[in-house]
Amino acid sequence: MFGNLDFDVIRRSLPYLFLDGMSFTLMLTGLSALGGLIFGTLIALMRLSSYKLLGRIAGLYVDFMRSLPLVLVIFWFYFLVPYIGQWLTGASRPIRVGAFTSSLVTFIMFEAAYFSEIMRAGIQSISKGQPAAASALGLTYSQSMRYIVLPQAFRNMLPVLLTQTIVLFQDTSLVYVLSIPDFLGAASKVAQRDGRLVEMYLFAALVYFVISCLASYGVRRLQARIAIVR
Amino acid sequence: MNYNWNWHIFFEPNPTGAGTYLDLLVSGLWLTIKTALLAWVIALIFGTIIGILRSLPSKTVSWIGFAYVEFFRNMPLLVQLFLWFFVLPELLPRTAGLWLKQLPNAPFWTAAIGVGLFMSARVAVQLAAGIASLPRGQKQAATALGLTTTQGYRYVLLPMAFRIIMPPLTSEFLNTVKNTSVAITIGLIELTGQARAMQEFSFQVFEAFTAATIMYLAINIIVVTGMRFLERSLAIPGYITGK
């Protein structure tokens, strides 16, 4: 069954796969998670705000993003980001942006919708007495959010946020549709160049599997540790 | 924004010679719905089996369920589709592989089965959680009434668990619909694929994507509204969601 397979192609392309492909994937995952977390927290705060209109806008954004397939969103931003750049800078033509910028914007905007729902649940899991005590101590709303509510919410939600980041790590493979050499894109380029689809795709699957498995094992251990403290 | 908007583009004939651009998108929409429904049937069947395995007391059996879920959850869907589409036919015996490659509509079947199996792992997790959330007395009562394990699951545990997990199943179904768009990478020209094709033929990027977006939103609204009725009629009396 594996008789005529040439696994040497993997060894030969390792530097390209990991130094170019995997580092792109990890960088995109890390920066998107960070950006999505910040933007998602803002959206969650908007949804919980006492101004109904703000909450409505944030809710629409989240529902909208969550109704669309990620592939379509990737295409949307790929074509939209140059126009946004033009609008922001006042240039006369659409700004040329690299594939990295466009996919980073996509993932931040897309993941923020998912992160914000997690954050909202986290903030709502904090008992009412906490912000009440904070305002009794004389803290302003933003202070009580920053020092009392958000740190606890982050801690409660950390395992879920990390699990969502693992999903994000897997989802970044979809930048394949823009022919970007992320890890899968790099594997695919080698596969097509050398006619070695079977070896390269099996190897890519294995690498994703091992990384995701280790990461989710880590999250489970973290969850157990946090659970003991509470 | 200096972009040439042209909303009439939908009624202009498309270059494939079969009707207008709108026809192109609508045919993509049908393909999305067909793929998603077949995938959902597969996800429910396999998800139910694995969900039950995970809830059984036997260590070996629940380990099989665990391994199944981990296998499908820890690989990107795109990679899984590539495995089914490009790798599987090469690993099978020559004749079987050749038959698989020459199958008409191969991207459709691969997408439906691939997305279905991917989603089955998530259905299994939901179902196992639903069964675990039932009071222990339910199973004991079933046993006390003289039901076998199979009958207990068939008549008591599964009907209860499925009614409890109706809301998460709705969002898993919507995820199935959205995930069919990943099949664009193995050449399935569903809704997202047709929008992309329309953009390449006509250069009207934003009209094409706007139309596809509206169609996905419509699917969402229809499914969510339908499921809300179903949820209400299936809610278990005495539970928070019930009357």
Image (tube, coloured by chain):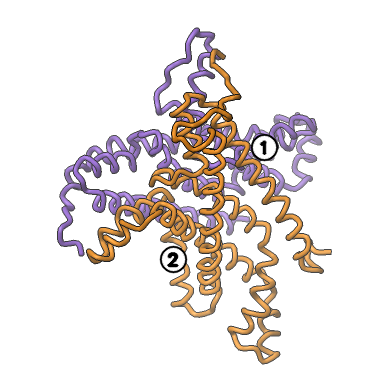
Labels 1 & 2 near each other (Cβ < 8 A): no
Chain of the residue on which disc 2 is drawn: B
Expressed as whole percent of the image width and height from the top left, the position of residue A1 reads: 20, 64
Chain of the residue on which disc 1 is drawn: A
* Marker count (numbered): 2
Residue that protrudes farthest toward the right in the picture: B243
Q: Which chain is purple?
A: A
User: Residue flagged by tag 1: what amino acid is it?
Assistant: Ala
Q: Which residue is mark 2?
A: B68
Does B178 sit left or right of B86 as displayed? Answer: right
Label 2: how many residues lie within 10 Å, few (<14), some (14-19) or many (20+)?
some
Colour for chain B in the figure: orange
Expressed as whole percent of the image width and height from the top left, the position of residue B142 reads: 68, 85
Seen in the picture, residue A125 relative to B143 is either above or below; the reply is: above
Decide if residue A152 is in sight here. no
User: Residue flagged by tag 2: what amino acid is it?
Assistant: Tyr
Q: Do badges 1 and 2 share one subunit?
A: no
Residue under the image location 50 percent in, 23 percent down:
A81
For mark 1, give the secondary structure: helix
Residue B215: image tag: none
Q: Which residue is mark 1?
A: A44
Which is closer to the viewer, label 1 or label 2?
A: 2
